Amino acid sequence: MKVAVFTLGCKTNLYESGQIISALIQAGHEAVHGLVPADVFVLNTCAVTGEAERKSRQAVQRARKLNPDCKIIIVGCAAEKNAAQFEALGNVGFVKGVANKTAIVNEIERFGADVEQLPSIFTETVFSTQERTRAFVKIQDGCNNFCSYCIVPYLRGRSRSRRIADVVREVRQAHAAETVLIGIDISQFGRDTGESLPQLFETLQGVNTRLRLGSLEARVVTDELLESLTHVNFCPHFHLSLQSGCDSVLRRMNRKYTTDEYLHAVSEIRRFFPDAAITTDVIVGFCGETEEEFEQTRNFVEIVKFADIHVFPYSPREGTAAYQWADVDGATKERRAEILGQIKRQLKNDFAMRFVGTEQEVLVERRRAGYWEGYTRQYLRVYFQGKANVGELVDVAITEPYKDGAKGETK
Ligand code: SF4
């Protein structure tokens, strides 16, 4: 049977789609990523925003256009949140929630909704999985934070961590040039098992892959963690989730740090890794955000000088604490998103400029329109010409900012 696995949302979903594909192939099916003609579609959905849910439903229509007789299996957060929204769309078969997506292999013929109980320990069967030249290794799932705008803890359950020995085994088995350690909130890694991120990195010393971290919270950026990262082949890229640069908004969001604590984390990172990329997410127009509060966020992102910012207009999610709170009007959200978008473009350009005249190690991902494309250790996207192969690490001389990154050349 040919199965196409289509992924929406975060790196954790992408990782889990890789697991599904590996499991399907092991079971003798032909399985590929993307929305391409197939007998069965597995749609790995996302519910983090209303827009993500809409795209998840739209994927069902797109799959049906590709093959009107197909079966569609829906998994992921949007299915967990509201399975009924998909069942009405036609051709939709087995709907499973976020838990143990690889069980799909055993149940591919089954129809009807079946949203599993969320697990309280890390229960998934793990397959080494490699996506787009990198290996993604999941080290944690779920979340205990209950940020007031976020539906994820209700969908994915409480935080649970993999054991260090299992993570290290999978990293070694992946044999990837780059390995990304991911989770829903990897800052919570080890709290349920008595292990910790610094211990994980101590155990990863000597592993032959460059290591990248998924999103972190400012409060876990300690000297102990940073020190442990200097002993492994670490890519100095920190995605430090901010959400707002204003303390009163952070309190309403139920975020558990202040802007001062965040700035302290940034300066500690730069003390250990002077050329580190620090990237972030910001929500604009969160409930009751005043012009003054937004201005504080705007100033804050310029002070930090982020290498990149993902800007999201706030979208109320039913079932969260903030759902009932007064919403900011859409035009104001759009204007604020546009203002931060302009700052982001300038900061990205400034970040690329810092590397002009230097040589950077680029992991080659693809060739398009006459250029090789890939990422440096600081996650700067580089376009270059010369000799290379997909999956290779190549030293590239950076010549100028270009598109969303920089242009370069090989010797
Ligand atoms: S840390 Fe907050 S935003 Fe992130 S998944 Fe947990 S509740 Fe959601």
Image (tube, grey):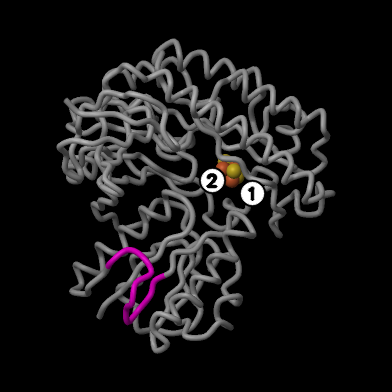
Picture quarter with ligand 1: top right
What are the residue bounds of the magenta stretch? 32-42
Residue located beneath label 1 in the image? 150
Residue 143 rendering spot, x and y as whole percentages: 54, 45
Q: In screen coordinates, is 314 left or right of 268?
A: right
State the residue at coordinates (21%, 38%).
Answer: 177
In the image, the residue with mark 1 has its CB under 8 Å from the nearest atom of ligand 1: yes
The residue tagged with tag 1: helix, strand or loop?
loop
Is residue 388 rendered magenta in the image? no
State the residue at coordinates (52%, 18%).
Answer: 266
Q: Which of marks 1 and 2 is in front?
A: 1
Quadrant where the image shows the N terminus? bottom left
State the residue at coordinates (23%, 41%).
Answer: 171
Q: What residue type is labelled 1?
A: Cys
User: Which label's residue is closer to the chain start, 1 or 2?
Assistant: 2
Residue located beneath label 2 in the image? 143
In the image, the residue with mark 2 has its CB under 8 Å from the nearest atom of ligand 1: yes
Q: Quadrant of residue 167?
A: top left
Point out the residue furthest to the front here: 370
